[in-house]
């Protein structure tokens, strides 16, 4: 007996798919019937309502049905080609243009009927669509859907390609639009024939009803072949919901697992904290006080804290971390603070040692350049419980540090680490196996995304900068105005302040006329600022050299620091008031924001220049103008996301987290909130996911993300 068609059947199970076509489909990521149905349309042709050319509206998308009148091609001055097609329907003529798409010419013989879909523009008085989606109608006799005979035997209804809202898929060579439509249709019909039970719906009927969403079977039929726009909207909503829901269940599961782990219970804060706050030259901001309360409540709750502390650059996260550490230290416990780079670890070490010394709190710093003998001594002191706070780079602290009374680990600049890494900390034995975890991050990712990525963490927000800060003024300038920029920098230095000059590359490379840090360092030190102390900092220097240069800059012995993006993260030299960024178009908005955040940390006004050499594209200019006018890190991160799309901006690929197909956490924020709650509710109802709804979710999670994601489930 022939095995039945199922979600997991290889696509070759379907009619008209042989080994060659299967290979082509695999290039689209389609190997099984389930993959095929998850290959959602990129867009749709609304063929229920073709617009007569005479009624097209400029600036609107439209679908037009007409006859090819002329086909032509010409060369551009830059050795490219432009293909032009004139299409008429008796009410007018619309021109379609493509660039460098010679192969299109063959398909459009005059007299053929075509469907076009795209944005309508007016160009030199004529109606135009630039690279529209199109479809050439088959000559009358052949049934629609038979592209190179591929629809054979599939009983494809004629209505798949016309007279309805029609899906437009991403294609690859060997996979045509009509053929793919017929194949998807065949899969939908085939599964239906097998029976309703073959649809592996991760959302149970109860949940669907409660949220007014269609079941999976309906959603997939409608996302591929929508009967009308409302059905399409619901199908889309339901599939977005499902993507969010699966990830949120994963997150909720981790969270639930943690809540069951007992944490070190702390008593009320003692005298150390009060002493520190009294000695500070400034008051804590309201936001700092609020998040400290949230942290303290966690520490006293009896459960292990897993909290994300978000705050824009310069908002004072380090101090919050230190006070949190004091909470545990004054009760006789130990804490660690981990930083992503050696330079930053050193800086934290120095800052905190200064604050800690008068309190009699022992802070040690451990990095890659710590000498062997010192390292041995530090490890021994830590293991003996003599060290209260150990500061260091992430990797070092994770490897073989033994802290018998560890109760808190703080991870700074979380976005530099992978998702999985953040909670893997080495603790002592026994009751202290599970230290409280505080993760800190500026805003490399927008709030809406961080909720997704860190959905298992509680969130604290420092949404206020310390008093007395002056906004940074940002100027976008041409490199011909460079002299003026140097003049302004000179004034800062004469007034005793310091300057950063940032370049995207360390050294000049052939074929690229980018100014480099090394080249500019020589020019600035030798010719432009011979009377000032100029130093160079980049990633290829030895750790000891880097530390030395940073220490001298922090101590005010260096006036101007020429650097690469090594200064991007975390550096805190409040006396620096000017930043010059060369080739800013090379950086993302979030990264520029981090760089600019190195200034504006004291009471004096700060300035930032973006120096552009040569021409900027319109897009790049817009982006940089937006940056110059915006100081809010959240706004910049969201703009980055809008420009680059969730895939890139999320940057999950390198973190190894599963992505979204349809869902967009920005656009779908409201749905996302609902999902998060539904996921937490499910875990409360079925902690082991073994009740009425859990198993179907588990199955879908396994299929979507693989077993390794599940095994992290309760960790
Ligand atoms: P970030 O949040 O970017 O890590 P930092 O912790 O480096 O910020 O703090 C930036 C600067 O602000 C530091 O020099 C710090 O001493 C100072 N600072 C922190 N809290 C306050 C406050 N409440 N008032 C004034 N300055 C503060
Ligand atoms: Mg910081």
Image (cartoon, grey):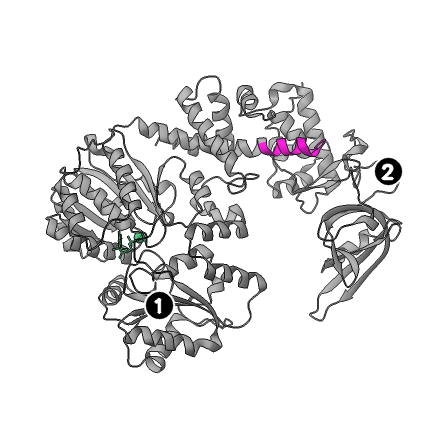
Q: Specify the principal SS of the magenta part.
A: helix
* Direction from residue 132 to residue 705 in the image, left or right: left
Please tell me the numbered disc located at residue 64. none
Residue of label 2: 142
**Could you tell which of marks 1 and 2 lies nearer the N-terminus?**
2
Residue of label 1: 578
Q: Quadrant of the N terminus?
A: top right
Residue 521, image x, y percentages:
35, 74
Q: Residue at x 60, y 19 (%)?
A: 197
Please tell me which residue lies in front, 150 or 370: 370
Q: What is the secondary structure assignment of the residue under circle 2?
A: loop
Residue 414, image x, y percentages:
35, 47
On screen, 673 above or below 211? below
Residue 628 visible in the picture: yes
* Direction from residue 64 to residue 579 in the image, left or right: left
Q: What is the secondary structure assignment of the residue under circle 1?
A: strand
For residue 661, which quarter of the picture? top right
Q: Is residue 226 magenta?
A: yes
Q: Are marks 1 and 2 in contact (CB under 8 Å)?
A: no
Residue 82, image x, y percentages:
75, 62
Q: Residue at x 23, y 42 (%)?
A: 324
| Mark 1 and mark 2: Cα distance apart in space | 71 Å
Please tell me which residue lies in front, 626 or 245: 626
Read off the magenta span: 225-237
Q: Number of labelled discs?
A: 2
Residue 342, image x, y percentages:
28, 56
* Direction from residue 486 to residue 221 in the image, left or right: right
* Direction from residue 49 to residue 332 in the image, left or right: left
For residue 540, which quarter of the picture? bottom left
Residue 114 visible in the picture: no
Classed neighbour count for the residue bearing mark 1: other residues with Cα under 10 Å, few (<14), some (14–19), many (≥20): many
């Amino acid at each position: 007996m022939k095995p039945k068609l199922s979600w997991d059947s290889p696509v070759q199970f379907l009619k008209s798919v042989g080994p060659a076509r299967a290979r082509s489909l695999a290039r689209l990521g389609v190997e099984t019937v389930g993959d095929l149905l998850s290959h959602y349309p990129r867009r749709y042709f609304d063929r229920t309502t073709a617009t007569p050319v005479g009624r097209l509206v400029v600036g609107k998308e439209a679908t037009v049905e007409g006859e090819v009148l002329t086909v032509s091609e010409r060369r551009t001055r830059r050795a490219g080609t432009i293909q032009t097609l004139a299409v008429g329907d008796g009410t007018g003529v619309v021109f379609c243009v493509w660039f460098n798409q010679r192969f299109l010419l063959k398909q459009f013989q005059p007299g053929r009927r075509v469907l076009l879909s795209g944005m309508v523009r007016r160009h030199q008085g004529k109606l135009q669509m630039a690279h529209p989606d199109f479809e050439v109608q088959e000559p009358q006799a052949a049934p629609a859907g038979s592209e190179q005979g591929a629809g054979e035997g599939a009983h494809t209804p004629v209505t798949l390609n016309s007279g309805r809202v029609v899906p437009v898929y991403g294609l690859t060579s060997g996979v045509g639009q009509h053929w793919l439509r017929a194949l998807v249709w065949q899969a939908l019909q085939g599964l239906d024939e097998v029976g309703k039970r073959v649809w592996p719906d991760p959302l149970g009927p109860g949940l669907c009803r409660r949220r007014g969403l269609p079941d999976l079977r309906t959603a997939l039929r409608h996302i591929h072949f929508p009967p009308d726009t409302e059905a399409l909207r619901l199908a889309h909503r339901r599939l977005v919901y499902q993507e969010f829901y699966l990830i949120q269940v994963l997150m909720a599961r981790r969270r639930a697992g943690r809540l069951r782990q007992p944490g070190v219970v702390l008593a009320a804060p003692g005298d150390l904290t009060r002493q520190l706050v009294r000695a500070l030259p400034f008051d804590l901001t309201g936001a700092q006080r609020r998040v400290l309360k949230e942290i303290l409540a966690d520490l006293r709750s009896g459960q292990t804290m897993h909290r994300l502390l978000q705050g824009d650059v310069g908002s004072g996260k380090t101090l919050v971390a230190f006070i949190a550490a004091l909470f545990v230290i004054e009760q006789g416990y130990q804490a660690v603070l981990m930083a992503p780079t050696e330079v930053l670890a050193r800086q934290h070490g120095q800052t905190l040692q200064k604050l800690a010394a008068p309190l009699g709190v022992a802070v040690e710093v451990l990095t890659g350049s710590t000498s062997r003998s010192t390292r041995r001594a530090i490890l021994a002191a830590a293991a003996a419980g003599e060290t209260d706070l150990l500061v260091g780079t992430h990797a070092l602290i994770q490897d073989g540090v033994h802290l018998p009374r560890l109760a808190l680990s703080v991870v700074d600049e979380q976005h530099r680490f992978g998702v999985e890494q953040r909670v893997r900390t080495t603790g002592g034995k026994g009751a202290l196996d599970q230290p409280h975890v505080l993760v800190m991050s500026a805003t490399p990712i927008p709030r809406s995304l961080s909720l997704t990525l860190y959905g298992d963490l509680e969130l604290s927000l420092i949404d206020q900068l310390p008093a007395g800060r002056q906004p940074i003024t940002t100027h976008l300038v041409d490199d011909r105005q460079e002299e003026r920029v140097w003049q302004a920098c000179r004034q800062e230095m004469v007034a005793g302040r310091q300057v950063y000059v940032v370049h995207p590359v360390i050294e000049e490379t052939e074929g690229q006329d980018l100014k480099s840090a090394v080249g500019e360092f020589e020019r600035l030190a030798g010719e432009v600022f011979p009377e000032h102390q100029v130093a160079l900092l980049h990633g290829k220097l030895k750790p000891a050299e880097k530390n030395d240069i940073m220490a001298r800059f922090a101590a005010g012995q260096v006036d101007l620091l020429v650097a690469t993006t090594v200064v991007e993260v975390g550096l805190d030299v409040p006396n620096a008031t000017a930043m010059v960024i060369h080739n800013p178009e090379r950086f993302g908005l979030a990264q520029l924001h981090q760089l600019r955040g190195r200034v504006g940390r004291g009471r004096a006004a700060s300035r930032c220049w973006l120096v552009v050499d040569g021409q900027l594209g319109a897009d790049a200019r817009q982006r940089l103008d937006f940056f110059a006018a915006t100081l809010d890190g959240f706004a910049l991160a969201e703009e980055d996301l809008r420009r680059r799309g969730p895939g890139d901006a999320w940057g999950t690929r390198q973190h190894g987290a599963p992505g979204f197909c349809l869902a967009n956490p920005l656009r779908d924020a409201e749905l996302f909130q609902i999902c998060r709650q539904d996921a937490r509710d499910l875990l409360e109802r079925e902690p082991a996911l073994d009740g009425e709804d859990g198993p179907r979710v588990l199955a879908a999670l396994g299929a979507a993300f693989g077993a390794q994601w599940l095994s992290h489930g309760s960790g």
